[in-house]
Amino acid sequence: MFDPIHSTQPINEALPRRTPRSTLLWLTLLFVVALGGSGCATVQPWERGQLAGEAMQNDVSVCHRFEHNNEVYREGAVGANGGKSGGGCGCT
Amino acid sequence: MYLRDRAMLRRAGLWLGVSLFLLSPLAAQEGFQSTGDIDVDFLFNYYQQDGENSPVTGGIGTEDMDVISPVIAVTWKVDDQWTLRSDLGVDGITSASVDAMDAEVSSASRQDNRTFLTVTASRQLAKQTLNLMAGLSNEYDYQSAMVGLGWSKDFNQRNTTVSAQVRHFSDTLDLYDIDGVDRGEDDRTTTDLTLGLTQVLGPRTVFSGELYWSNQSGYLGTPFHEVILQDGSRVTERLPEDRTRTALGLWLNHAFTERFVGRVHYRFYDDDWGIQAHTIELEPQFKVGDRSWIFPILRFHSQDGADYFGLPFAFNGSEDFITADRDLSEFTSEKYGIGYRTTFAPGRQGWTRRMRSFETRVSIYNREDGLESISASFAWGWRF
Protein backbone atom coordinates (compact mmCIF):
# COMPACT_ATOMS: atom_id res chain seq x y z
CA MET A 1 0.00 0.00 0.00
CA PHE A 2 1.27 3.45 -0.88
CA ASP A 3 2.61 5.34 2.13
CA PRO A 4 2.52 9.05 1.24
CA ILE A 5 4.61 10.04 4.23
CA HIS A 6 7.63 7.81 3.70
CA SER A 7 7.47 7.20 -0.01
CA THR A 8 10.10 8.80 -2.19
CA GLN A 9 7.77 8.63 -5.13
CA PRO A 10 5.80 11.71 -6.27
CA ILE A 11 2.41 11.20 -4.75
CA ASN A 12 0.47 11.36 -7.97
CA GLU A 13 2.49 8.70 -9.69
CA ALA A 14 1.42 6.26 -7.02
CA LEU A 15 -2.27 7.02 -7.00
CA PRO A 16 -4.56 6.07 -9.89
CA ARG A 17 -6.75 8.65 -11.53
CA ARG A 18 -10.29 8.54 -10.29
CA THR A 19 -12.03 10.09 -13.27
CA PRO A 20 -11.31 9.78 -16.99
CA ARG A 21 -10.68 13.01 -18.82
CA SER A 22 -13.51 12.23 -21.17
CA THR A 23 -15.88 13.19 -18.37
CA LEU A 24 -15.47 16.81 -19.33
CA LEU A 25 -16.34 16.03 -22.92
CA TRP A 26 -19.52 14.29 -21.84
CA LEU A 27 -20.46 17.14 -19.56
CA THR A 28 -19.73 19.62 -22.32
CA LEU A 29 -21.95 17.62 -24.64
CA LEU A 30 -24.68 17.71 -22.01
CA PHE A 31 -24.26 21.47 -21.76
CA VAL A 32 -24.54 21.87 -25.53
CA VAL A 33 -27.65 19.66 -25.61
CA ALA A 34 -29.16 21.76 -22.84
CA LEU A 35 -28.30 24.86 -24.83
CA GLY A 36 -29.98 23.47 -27.91
CA GLY A 37 -33.11 22.47 -26.05
CA SER A 38 -33.38 25.61 -24.03
CA GLY A 39 -36.23 27.12 -26.00
CA CYS A 40 -38.74 24.65 -24.63
CA ALA A 41 -39.93 26.36 -21.47
CA THR A 42 -41.83 29.61 -21.59
CA VAL A 43 -42.94 31.17 -18.34
CA GLN A 44 -45.17 34.17 -18.84
CA PRO A 45 -44.28 37.50 -17.21
CA TRP A 46 -47.15 37.27 -14.74
CA GLU A 47 -45.83 33.90 -13.56
CA ARG A 48 -42.37 35.17 -12.74
CA GLY A 49 -42.94 36.57 -9.28
CA GLN A 50 -40.80 34.02 -7.47
CA LEU A 51 -38.19 33.90 -10.22
CA ALA A 52 -37.51 37.59 -9.69
CA GLY A 53 -36.87 37.14 -5.98
CA GLU A 54 -33.38 37.94 -4.73
CA ALA A 55 -32.83 34.44 -3.36
CA MET A 56 -33.21 33.04 -6.90
CA GLN A 57 -30.35 35.08 -8.32
CA ASN A 58 -26.95 33.39 -8.69
CA ASP A 59 -25.07 36.41 -7.38
CA VAL A 60 -27.36 37.03 -4.43
CA SER A 61 -24.54 36.98 -1.86
CA VAL A 62 -22.21 39.91 -2.47
CA CYS A 63 -19.78 38.63 0.19
CA HIS A 64 -19.37 35.31 -1.61
CA ARG A 65 -16.65 36.86 -3.78
CA PHE A 66 -14.18 36.75 -0.92
CA GLU A 67 -14.61 33.03 -0.35
CA HIS A 68 -14.33 32.40 -4.11
CA ASN A 69 -11.08 34.30 -4.07
CA ASN A 70 -9.70 32.28 -1.15
CA GLU A 71 -10.69 29.02 -2.83
CA VAL A 72 -8.94 30.04 -6.04
CA TYR A 73 -5.68 30.36 -4.10
CA ARG A 74 -6.07 27.26 -1.95
CA GLU A 75 -7.16 24.90 -4.71
CA GLY A 76 -5.62 24.14 -8.05
CA ALA A 77 -9.05 24.09 -9.67
CA VAL A 78 -10.60 27.39 -10.71
CA GLY A 79 -13.16 28.70 -13.16
CA ALA A 80 -16.88 28.21 -13.76
CA ASN A 81 -17.69 29.39 -10.26
CA GLY A 82 -17.90 33.12 -10.73
CA GLY A 83 -14.55 33.59 -8.99
CA LYS A 84 -11.24 35.05 -10.02
CA SER A 85 -9.48 33.07 -12.69
CA GLY A 86 -6.12 34.67 -13.20
CA GLY A 87 -3.99 37.68 -12.65
CA GLY A 88 -3.49 39.76 -9.58
CA CYS A 89 -1.66 37.10 -7.62
CA GLY A 90 -2.00 37.65 -3.85
CA CYS A 91 -0.71 34.11 -3.87
CA THR A 92 1.12 33.90 -0.59
CA MET B 1 -3.70 43.52 14.96
CA TYR B 2 -4.08 44.98 11.49
CA LEU B 3 -6.05 47.97 12.52
CA ARG B 4 -2.93 49.19 14.27
CA ASP B 5 -1.22 49.38 10.94
CA ARG B 6 -1.22 53.07 10.25
CA ALA B 7 -0.33 52.68 6.58
CA MET B 8 -3.34 50.49 6.12
CA LEU B 9 -5.61 52.96 7.81
CA ARG B 10 -4.21 55.81 5.75
CA ARG B 11 -4.83 53.83 2.57
CA ALA B 12 -8.40 52.96 3.55
CA GLY B 13 -9.03 56.59 4.47
CA LEU B 14 -7.60 57.76 1.18
CA TRP B 15 -9.85 55.45 -0.78
CA LEU B 16 -12.88 56.53 1.15
CA GLY B 17 -11.96 60.14 0.49
CA VAL B 18 -11.42 59.53 -3.21
CA SER B 19 -14.75 57.77 -3.51
CA LEU B 20 -16.58 60.58 -1.76
CA PHE B 21 -14.72 63.11 -3.88
CA LEU B 22 -15.80 61.32 -7.03
CA LEU B 23 -19.38 61.16 -5.86
CA SER B 24 -19.66 64.72 -4.58
CA PRO B 25 -19.92 66.49 -7.97
CA LEU B 26 -22.83 64.27 -8.79
CA ALA B 27 -24.58 65.11 -5.56
CA ALA B 28 -23.87 68.78 -6.10
CA GLN B 29 -25.44 68.91 -9.54
CA GLU B 30 -28.44 71.13 -9.73
CA GLY B 31 -31.52 69.06 -9.69
CA PHE B 32 -29.75 65.94 -8.51
CA GLN B 33 -32.14 63.95 -6.39
CA SER B 34 -31.87 60.75 -4.44
CA THR B 35 -33.28 58.75 -7.29
CA GLY B 36 -31.49 55.53 -6.52
CA ASP B 37 -28.93 56.11 -9.24
CA ILE B 38 -25.80 55.30 -7.24
CA ASP B 39 -25.29 52.24 -5.09
CA VAL B 40 -22.25 52.12 -2.83
CA ASP B 41 -21.31 48.87 -1.13
CA PHE B 42 -18.75 48.75 1.63
CA LEU B 43 -17.37 45.24 1.86
CA PHE B 44 -14.94 43.77 4.31
CA ASN B 45 -13.41 40.33 4.69
CA TYR B 46 -11.16 38.84 7.33
CA TYR B 47 -9.40 35.59 6.42
CA GLN B 48 -7.17 33.52 8.66
CA GLN B 49 -5.55 30.19 7.88
CA ASP B 50 -3.09 27.81 9.45
CA GLY B 51 -1.42 24.59 8.39
CA GLU B 52 1.95 22.88 8.49
CA ASN B 53 2.85 22.42 4.83
CA SER B 54 3.95 25.77 3.50
CA PRO B 55 5.46 25.60 0.00
CA VAL B 56 7.57 28.63 0.88
CA THR B 57 9.59 26.38 3.17
CA GLY B 58 9.54 23.30 0.97
CA GLY B 59 6.26 21.80 2.13
CA ILE B 60 7.28 21.74 5.79
CA GLY B 61 6.46 24.74 7.95
CA THR B 62 3.67 26.99 9.07
CA GLU B 63 1.06 28.26 6.65
CA ASP B 64 -0.18 30.81 9.17
CA MET B 65 -1.61 33.77 7.29
CA ASP B 66 -4.04 36.58 7.92
CA VAL B 67 -5.67 38.75 5.28
CA ILE B 68 -8.00 41.69 5.63
CA SER B 69 -9.75 42.94 2.52
CA PRO B 70 -11.78 46.15 2.52
CA VAL B 71 -13.51 46.91 -0.80
CA ILE B 72 -15.64 49.82 -1.99
CA ALA B 73 -17.94 48.98 -4.89
CA VAL B 74 -19.74 51.82 -6.61
CA THR B 75 -22.48 51.15 -9.17
CA TRP B 76 -23.83 54.16 -11.06
CA LYS B 77 -26.87 53.70 -13.25
CA VAL B 78 -26.18 56.61 -15.55
CA ASP B 79 -29.38 56.26 -17.58
CA ASP B 80 -31.59 53.55 -19.04
CA GLN B 81 -28.73 52.30 -21.19
CA TRP B 82 -25.48 52.81 -19.31
CA THR B 83 -24.28 51.47 -15.99
CA LEU B 84 -20.80 52.05 -14.60
CA ARG B 85 -19.27 50.03 -11.79
CA SER B 86 -15.96 50.25 -10.00
CA ASP B 87 -14.44 47.99 -7.35
CA LEU B 88 -11.56 49.40 -5.38
CA GLY B 89 -9.95 47.25 -2.71
CA VAL B 90 -6.89 46.11 -0.87
CA ASP B 91 -5.71 42.80 0.53
CA GLY B 92 -3.56 43.33 3.61
CA ILE B 93 -1.60 40.09 3.90
CA THR B 94 0.44 38.93 6.87
CA SER B 95 2.12 35.59 6.25
CA ALA B 96 4.45 33.81 8.62
CA SER B 97 6.02 31.78 5.82
CA VAL B 98 6.75 34.75 3.61
CA ASP B 99 8.15 36.41 6.69
CA ALA B 100 11.02 33.96 6.32
CA MET B 101 12.09 35.91 3.26
CA ASP B 102 14.65 38.64 3.52
CA ALA B 103 13.41 41.68 5.43
CA GLU B 104 14.11 44.02 2.55
CA VAL B 105 11.61 42.26 0.37
CA SER B 106 8.46 41.89 2.32
CA SER B 107 8.68 41.35 5.97
CA ALA B 108 9.97 44.51 7.54
CA SER B 109 6.44 45.07 8.73
CA ARG B 110 5.35 41.44 8.34
CA GLN B 111 2.72 42.74 5.94
CA ASP B 112 2.26 42.97 2.19
CA ASN B 113 -0.53 44.81 0.47
CA ARG B 114 -2.24 44.03 -2.78
CA THR B 115 -4.36 46.83 -4.20
CA PHE B 116 -6.77 46.47 -7.07
CA LEU B 117 -9.24 48.47 -9.13
CA THR B 118 -11.74 47.02 -11.57
CA VAL B 119 -14.03 49.17 -13.72
CA THR B 120 -16.95 47.86 -15.76
CA ALA B 121 -19.13 49.78 -18.22
CA SER B 122 -22.37 48.11 -19.25
CA ARG B 123 -24.69 49.13 -22.02
CA GLN B 124 -28.19 47.77 -22.42
CA LEU B 125 -29.36 47.44 -26.02
CA ALA B 126 -32.93 46.15 -26.11
CA LYS B 127 -32.48 42.48 -25.26
CA GLN B 128 -28.71 42.59 -25.30
CA THR B 129 -26.14 43.77 -22.78
CA LEU B 130 -22.54 44.67 -23.58
CA ASN B 131 -19.86 44.90 -20.88
CA LEU B 132 -16.43 46.44 -21.12
CA MET B 133 -14.04 45.65 -18.27
CA ALA B 134 -10.62 46.85 -17.22
CA GLY B 135 -8.65 46.22 -14.08
CA LEU B 136 -5.34 46.83 -12.38
CA SER B 137 -3.73 45.05 -9.45
CA ASN B 138 -0.48 45.80 -7.68
CA GLU B 139 1.51 43.87 -5.09
CA TYR B 140 5.11 44.48 -4.06
CA ASP B 141 6.33 41.80 -6.47
CA TYR B 142 3.38 41.41 -8.80
CA GLN B 143 1.55 43.74 -11.18
CA SER B 144 -1.48 42.74 -13.21
CA ALA B 145 -3.61 44.43 -15.85
CA MET B 146 -6.87 43.08 -17.25
CA VAL B 147 -9.18 43.96 -20.12
CA GLY B 148 -12.37 42.14 -20.94
CA LEU B 149 -15.50 42.13 -23.06
CA GLY B 150 -18.83 40.55 -22.21
CA TRP B 151 -22.11 40.08 -24.04
CA SER B 152 -25.47 38.61 -23.15
CA LYS B 153 -28.80 38.32 -24.90
CA ASP B 154 -32.28 37.36 -23.79
CA PHE B 155 -34.47 35.08 -25.85
CA ASN B 156 -37.80 33.34 -25.54
CA GLN B 157 -39.59 36.11 -23.65
CA ARG B 158 -36.62 36.40 -21.30
CA ASN B 159 -36.83 32.76 -20.33
CA THR B 160 -33.45 32.10 -21.92
CA THR B 161 -30.27 34.12 -21.63
CA VAL B 162 -27.01 33.29 -23.34
CA SER B 163 -23.78 35.06 -22.53
CA ALA B 164 -20.12 35.15 -23.50
CA GLN B 165 -17.15 36.80 -21.89
CA VAL B 166 -13.50 37.00 -22.77
CA ARG B 167 -10.76 38.49 -20.58
CA HIS B 168 -7.04 38.93 -20.94
CA PHE B 169 -4.67 39.36 -18.00
CA SER B 170 -1.15 40.59 -18.47
CA ASP B 171 1.00 40.16 -15.36
CA THR B 172 4.57 41.05 -14.43
CA LEU B 173 6.47 39.32 -11.61
CA ASP B 174 9.57 40.35 -9.75
CA LEU B 175 11.42 37.09 -9.13
CA TYR B 176 12.42 37.35 -5.47
CA ASP B 177 13.66 34.02 -4.15
CA ILE B 178 13.44 32.73 -0.60
CA ASP B 179 16.56 34.67 0.37
CA GLY B 180 15.06 37.89 -0.91
CA VAL B 181 17.43 38.03 -3.86
CA ASP B 182 15.93 39.67 -6.93
CA ARG B 183 16.42 37.25 -9.83
CA GLY B 184 14.97 39.62 -12.40
CA GLU B 185 11.56 39.93 -13.90
CA ASP B 186 9.21 37.67 -15.84
CA ASP B 187 5.67 37.79 -17.12
CA ARG B 188 2.51 35.76 -17.20
CA THR B 189 -0.51 36.08 -19.45
CA THR B 190 -3.95 34.61 -18.96
CA THR B 191 -6.78 34.55 -21.45
CA ASP B 192 -10.12 33.11 -20.45
CA LEU B 193 -13.41 32.55 -22.20
CA THR B 194 -16.73 31.89 -20.52
CA LEU B 195 -19.93 30.80 -22.26
CA GLY B 196 -23.09 30.90 -20.20
CA LEU B 197 -26.69 29.83 -20.43
CA THR B 198 -29.52 30.67 -18.04
CA GLN B 199 -32.81 28.90 -18.63
CA VAL B 200 -36.09 29.27 -16.79
CA LEU B 201 -37.42 25.77 -16.31
CA GLY B 202 -40.69 26.76 -14.66
CA PRO B 203 -42.31 29.42 -12.47
CA ARG B 204 -40.16 28.30 -9.56
CA THR B 205 -37.01 26.90 -11.16
CA VAL B 206 -33.98 28.39 -12.91
CA PHE B 207 -31.03 26.51 -14.38
CA SER B 208 -27.69 28.06 -15.27
CA GLY B 209 -24.63 26.58 -16.92
CA GLU B 210 -21.19 27.99 -17.55
CA LEU B 211 -18.47 26.58 -19.74
CA TYR B 212 -15.04 27.96 -18.96
CA TRP B 213 -11.72 27.76 -20.78
CA SER B 214 -8.47 29.51 -19.99
CA ASN B 215 -4.89 29.43 -21.15
CA GLN B 216 -1.95 30.70 -19.15
CA SER B 217 1.58 31.14 -20.36
CA GLY B 218 4.80 32.54 -18.98
CA TYR B 219 6.25 32.07 -15.51
CA LEU B 220 3.55 30.06 -13.71
CA GLY B 221 5.47 29.11 -10.60
CA THR B 222 6.15 31.15 -7.49
CA PRO B 223 9.81 32.15 -7.24
CA PHE B 224 9.99 31.81 -3.45
CA HIS B 225 8.39 28.35 -3.32
CA GLU B 226 10.93 25.66 -2.47
CA VAL B 227 11.19 21.91 -2.90
CA ILE B 228 13.23 19.70 -0.55
CA LEU B 229 15.04 17.06 -2.56
CA GLN B 230 15.97 13.53 -1.45
CA ASP B 231 19.43 14.66 -0.39
CA GLY B 232 17.94 17.38 1.77
CA SER B 233 18.94 20.26 -0.48
CA ARG B 234 16.39 22.89 -1.38
CA VAL B 235 15.62 24.19 -4.87
CA THR B 236 13.04 26.56 -6.30
CA GLU B 237 9.90 24.88 -7.62
CA ARG B 238 9.78 24.35 -11.37
CA LEU B 239 6.48 24.35 -13.28
CA PRO B 240 5.60 24.35 -16.99
CA GLU B 241 5.23 27.64 -18.81
CA ASP B 242 1.84 26.81 -20.21
CA ARG B 243 -1.42 25.70 -18.64
CA THR B 244 -4.85 25.14 -20.14
CA ARG B 245 -7.89 24.78 -17.92
CA THR B 246 -11.46 23.84 -18.70
CA ALA B 247 -14.39 23.77 -16.35
CA LEU B 248 -18.12 23.32 -16.41
CA GLY B 249 -20.35 24.86 -13.76
CA LEU B 250 -24.03 24.10 -13.26
CA TRP B 251 -26.48 25.92 -11.00
CA LEU B 252 -30.04 24.98 -10.10
CA ASN B 253 -32.23 27.26 -8.01
CA HIS B 254 -35.72 26.18 -6.99
CA ALA B 255 -38.23 28.05 -4.84
CA PHE B 256 -39.97 25.34 -2.84
CA THR B 257 -42.05 28.01 -1.12
CA GLU B 258 -41.91 31.79 -0.91
CA ARG B 259 -39.78 31.37 2.20
CA PHE B 260 -37.48 28.53 1.17
CA VAL B 261 -35.27 28.50 -1.91
CA GLY B 262 -32.99 25.56 -2.62
CA ARG B 263 -29.72 26.36 -4.38
CA VAL B 264 -27.16 23.87 -5.62
CA HIS B 265 -24.00 24.39 -7.67
CA TYR B 266 -21.79 21.70 -9.20
CA ARG B 267 -18.49 22.20 -11.01
CA PHE B 268 -16.24 19.86 -12.92
CA TYR B 269 -12.69 21.01 -13.63
CA ASP B 270 -9.85 19.63 -15.73
CA ASP B 271 -6.43 20.96 -16.72
CA ASP B 272 -3.34 19.78 -18.55
CA TRP B 273 -1.23 19.70 -15.39
CA GLY B 274 -3.20 16.64 -14.34
CA ILE B 275 -5.73 18.16 -11.97
CA GLN B 276 -9.33 17.06 -12.16
CA ALA B 277 -11.79 18.28 -9.59
CA HIS B 278 -15.41 18.03 -8.53
CA THR B 279 -17.06 20.68 -6.39
CA ILE B 280 -20.58 20.82 -5.00
CA GLU B 281 -21.98 23.77 -3.13
CA LEU B 282 -25.30 24.18 -1.33
CA GLU B 283 -26.67 27.46 0.00
CA PRO B 284 -30.40 27.03 0.72
CA GLN B 285 -32.11 30.29 1.62
CA PHE B 286 -34.63 30.62 4.44
CA LYS B 287 -36.67 33.79 4.73
CA VAL B 288 -37.04 35.24 8.20
CA GLY B 289 -39.42 38.14 8.68
CA ASP B 290 -40.42 40.26 5.70
CA ARG B 291 -37.04 41.33 4.31
CA SER B 292 -34.34 39.03 5.67
CA TRP B 293 -32.81 35.70 4.70
CA ILE B 294 -30.61 33.29 6.57
CA PHE B 295 -28.61 30.67 4.71
CA PRO B 296 -26.39 27.78 5.74
CA ILE B 297 -23.25 27.32 3.61
CA LEU B 298 -22.04 23.88 2.60
CA ARG B 299 -19.31 23.07 0.10
CA PHE B 300 -17.39 19.90 -0.74
CA HIS B 301 -14.40 19.79 -3.07
CA SER B 302 -12.30 16.88 -4.30
CA GLN B 303 -9.33 17.09 -6.67
CA ASP B 304 -6.58 14.96 -8.12
CA GLY B 305 -3.14 16.43 -7.77
CA ALA B 306 -0.97 17.90 -10.48
CA ASP B 307 1.57 15.59 -12.09
CA TYR B 308 4.38 17.71 -10.71
CA PHE B 309 3.47 17.61 -7.04
CA GLY B 310 5.49 15.61 -4.55
CA LEU B 311 5.93 15.47 -0.82
CA PRO B 312 9.20 16.70 0.72
CA PHE B 313 12.13 14.33 -0.11
CA ALA B 314 10.15 12.79 -2.99
CA PHE B 315 12.17 14.26 -5.87
CA ASN B 316 15.82 13.68 -6.74
CA GLY B 317 16.13 16.94 -8.67
CA SER B 318 16.45 15.46 -12.15
CA GLU B 319 12.75 15.95 -12.89
CA ASP B 320 11.76 18.71 -15.29
CA PHE B 321 8.96 20.01 -13.09
CA ILE B 322 8.63 19.79 -9.32
CA THR B 323 6.58 21.48 -6.66
CA ALA B 324 5.68 20.95 -3.01
CA ASP B 325 2.70 23.30 -3.15
CA ARG B 326 -0.21 21.50 -1.50
CA ASP B 327 -2.64 23.67 -3.45
CA LEU B 328 -1.67 21.45 -6.40
CA SER B 329 -1.91 18.15 -4.51
CA GLU B 330 -4.65 15.56 -4.28
CA PHE B 331 -7.08 16.37 -1.49
CA THR B 332 -10.65 16.79 -0.41
CA SER B 333 -11.91 19.86 1.41
CA GLU B 334 -15.08 20.93 3.16
CA LYS B 335 -16.51 24.32 3.88
CA TYR B 336 -19.42 25.08 6.15
CA GLY B 337 -20.84 28.26 7.55
CA ILE B 338 -23.82 30.53 7.80
CA GLY B 339 -24.94 33.83 6.33
CA TYR B 340 -27.56 36.49 6.93
CA ARG B 341 -28.85 39.13 4.56
CA THR B 342 -31.44 41.85 4.94
CA THR B 343 -32.76 44.73 2.89
CA PHE B 344 -34.08 47.96 4.34
CA ALA B 345 -37.49 49.32 3.53
CA PRO B 346 -37.56 52.70 1.77
CA GLY B 347 -39.16 55.72 3.37
CA ARG B 348 -37.07 55.84 6.54
CA GLN B 349 -35.96 59.17 7.99
CA GLY B 350 -32.60 60.36 9.26
CA TRP B 351 -29.15 59.08 8.32
CA THR B 352 -30.42 55.54 7.83
CA ARG B 353 -32.64 56.55 4.93
CA ARG B 354 -29.87 55.76 2.44
CA MET B 355 -29.18 52.28 3.77
CA ARG B 356 -30.11 49.65 1.22
CA SER B 357 -28.91 46.26 2.46
CA PHE B 358 -26.67 44.46 4.89
CA GLU B 359 -25.12 41.02 4.61
CA THR B 360 -22.73 39.01 6.71
CA ARG B 361 -21.37 35.50 6.33
CA VAL B 362 -18.80 33.38 8.09
CA SER B 363 -17.40 30.06 6.95
CA ILE B 364 -14.83 27.51 8.05
CA TYR B 365 -12.72 25.62 5.51
CA ASN B 366 -10.90 22.36 6.24
CA ARG B 367 -8.51 20.74 3.78
CA GLU B 368 -7.54 17.08 4.05
CA ASP B 369 -3.86 17.90 4.59
CA GLY B 370 -4.61 19.85 7.74
CA LEU B 371 -4.99 23.36 6.35
CA GLU B 372 -7.77 25.15 8.21
CA SER B 373 -9.15 28.59 7.58
CA ILE B 374 -11.94 30.91 8.60
CA SER B 375 -13.47 33.66 6.51
CA ALA B 376 -15.76 36.36 7.91
CA SER B 377 -17.29 39.04 5.71
CA PHE B 378 -19.85 41.78 5.71
CA ALA B 379 -21.28 44.06 3.06
CA TRP B 380 -23.17 47.23 3.77
CA GLY B 381 -25.13 48.68 0.86
CA TRP B 382 -26.13 52.32 0.53
CA ARG B 383 -28.10 54.15 -2.13
CA PHE B 384 -27.47 57.80 -3.00
Image (cartoon, rainbow, N blue to C red):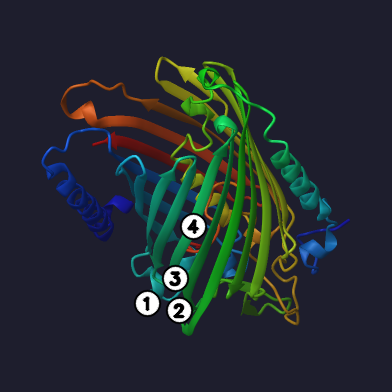
In the image, B224 versus B240, the foreground residue is: B240
Q: Which residue is mark 2?
A: B180
Q: Are marks 3 and 1 on the same chain?
A: yes
- Asked whether disc 3 touches disc 2, contact meaning CB atoms under 8 Å apart, the reply is no
N-terminal-most mark, 3 or 2: 3
Disc 4/disc 2 C-alpha distance (Å): 38 Å
**Parent chain of label 1:** B
Q: Quadrant of residue B341?
A: top left
Between circles 1 and 4, the one closer to the viewer is 4
Of all chains, the one bearing label 3 is B
Mark pair 3, 1: CA separation: 16 Å
Determine whether, in the image, residue B380 is placed left or right of residue A30. left
Q: Earlier in the sequence, mark 3 or mark 4?
A: 3
Q: Secondary structure at mark 3?
A: strand
User: Going from the N terminus, do you reach mark 4 or mark 2 first?
Assistant: 4
Q: Are marks 3 and 2 on the same chain?
A: yes
Q: Which residue is mark 4?
A: B149
How many dots with numbers?
4
- Distance between the alpha carbons at the discs numbered 3 and 4: 24 Å
Name which residue type carries label 3.
Tyr
Q: Residue furthest right?
A: A1
Residue at (36%, 51%) from the top-left corner? Answer: B87
The percent position of residue A27, horizontal first and vertical second, equals 76, 46
Spatial CA distance of label 1 from label 4 is: 39 Å
The residue that label 3 is drawn on is B142
Q: Are marks 2 and 1 in contact (CB under 8 Å)?
A: yes
- Amino acid type of the residue that numbered disc 4 sits on in the rendered structure: Leu
At mark 2, the secondary structure is loop
